[in-house]
Image (cartoon, rainbow, N blue to C red):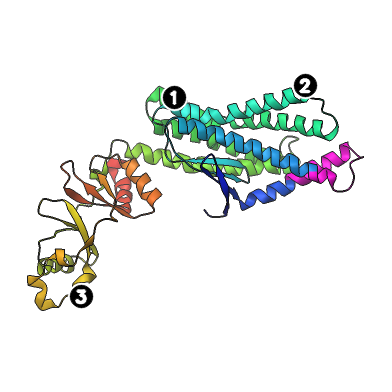
Amino acid sequence: MNGNLRVGNLFGIPFYVNVSWFLVLSLVTWQYGSGLAAAFPYLAGALPWVLGLGAALMLFASVLAHELGHSFAARKQGIGVNSITLFLFGGLASLEKESETPKGAFWVAIAGPLVSFALFGLFSIAGLVLPLSGPIAGIVGLLAYINLALGAFNLIPGMPLDGGNVLKAIVWKITGQPHKGLVFASRMGQVIGWSAIALGAASIVGLSPVGSIWTLLIGLFMLQNANRTAQFGEVQGRLTGLTAADAMAQDSPVIEANRSLREFADNALLAAPSAWRKFLVADETGLLVGTVLVDALKQVPREQWASTTVAAIMESADDVLTVGVDQPLMEVIKTLETQKIQSLAVIGNDGALAGLLEKTSIQSLLQSPQAA
């Protein structure tokens, strides 16, 4: 991952910290340490900042617990968790896929804030019933407040916050369309993001007593992510109801294994300048059996092309990923993205090779009037 350092595993989930996290850790440690030094002058030497570091680490442990809440709720629905990452503005649990129902999406979204509120209750009770005093009591009280603020802040109803995902689930439930929920919650996130930017900027120039540079930065973060999710939601809407068959290349590069290299050359080399450089190979029943590069023709003398079949120079199809012809196009896109590939072989309902699907053909489909 770019800018992320792997720390280890938590309950089998890869755990990362972004390089920006170390900056925030330093700032929070200094802020907490300075506060403790001012509140408790008898703390000697570096002790206030050591305690400040401990408080900062407990803060991020609370953020981590928040993300684990999302992760466990997702796992309960059979959704894998790719990783948890701590970064500048908090944490992120990366899930393999979205919930299949609005109810499931609601519980994944709300689980994080519920964990934060539970930690608020735990630290509050600890401060009341345990014989704590001095800086330790102050840190426990601070952690209670931080978790309350973390849970409440994340319930703001705009993407990419948890409250935005809760709102998305509600609109999804009402409309029956997940993309409508995503677009609506993203628009709310854009409004909130612009509002935070304006408030932060006004506070910086002295026009507002409320807000700070952090308000502006959080607004920029929200706006950037809300713009991205809004675009994704709009794409989801255009792709709703479309399948792999709709984006399959009309002139898919498919050749039969028993064809001669002469026939292969005629199909591959006499085509347009933008001709395919790699073909999928099917047997006489239509099953995918391999792939062949146009450049592989150079390995065989021209005088042998008529008597040599494609099967003789083809490579195994073991590394070719396939999708069903009726697979929803959104799932196809996720496969392309997660596998970091540019194309997939499309298999028909009868098991025969139907054609090739490329990222570029999906982009062309999105730009066509019928997908708008």
In the rendered image, the quadrant that contains the C terminus is: top left
How far apart are the two marked residues, 2 and 1, measured between alpha carbons?
Answer: 37 Å
* Label whose residue precedes the other's in the sequence (2 or 3): 2
65 or 229, which lies in front?
65
Q: Is residue 263 above or below residue 109?
A: below
Q: Which residue is mark 1?
A: 103
Q: Which residue is mark 2?
A: 129
Q: Is residue 129 magenta?
A: no
Whole-percent x and y of residue 284? 9, 54
Q: Mark 2: few, some, or many residues within 10 Å (few <14, many ≥20)? A: few
Q: Amino acid at mark 3?
A: Lys
Whole-percent x and y of residue 45? 88, 48
Q: Is residue 6 above or below residue 270?
A: above
| 2 and 3 marks in contact (CB < 8 Å) | no
Q: Is residue 201 among the parts visible in the rendering?
A: no
Q: Is residue 37 magenta?
A: yes
Q: Which residues are magenta?
A: 28-50
Quick check: 125 left or right of 290?
right
The local secondary structure at tag 3 comes to helix
Q: Amino acid at mark 2?
A: Val
Q: Mark 3: few, some, or many residues within 10 Å (few <14, many ≥20)? A: few
* Label whose residue precedes the other's in the sequence (2 or 1): 1
Q: Which residue is mark 3?
A: 298
The local secondary structure at tag 2 comes to helix
The local secondary structure at tag 1 comes to helix
Q: Amino acid at mark 1?
A: Lys
Whole-percent x and y of residue 265? 14, 69
Whole-percent x and y of residue 225? 52, 42
46 or 149, which lies in front?
46
Q: Is residue 189 among the parts visible in the rendering?
A: yes
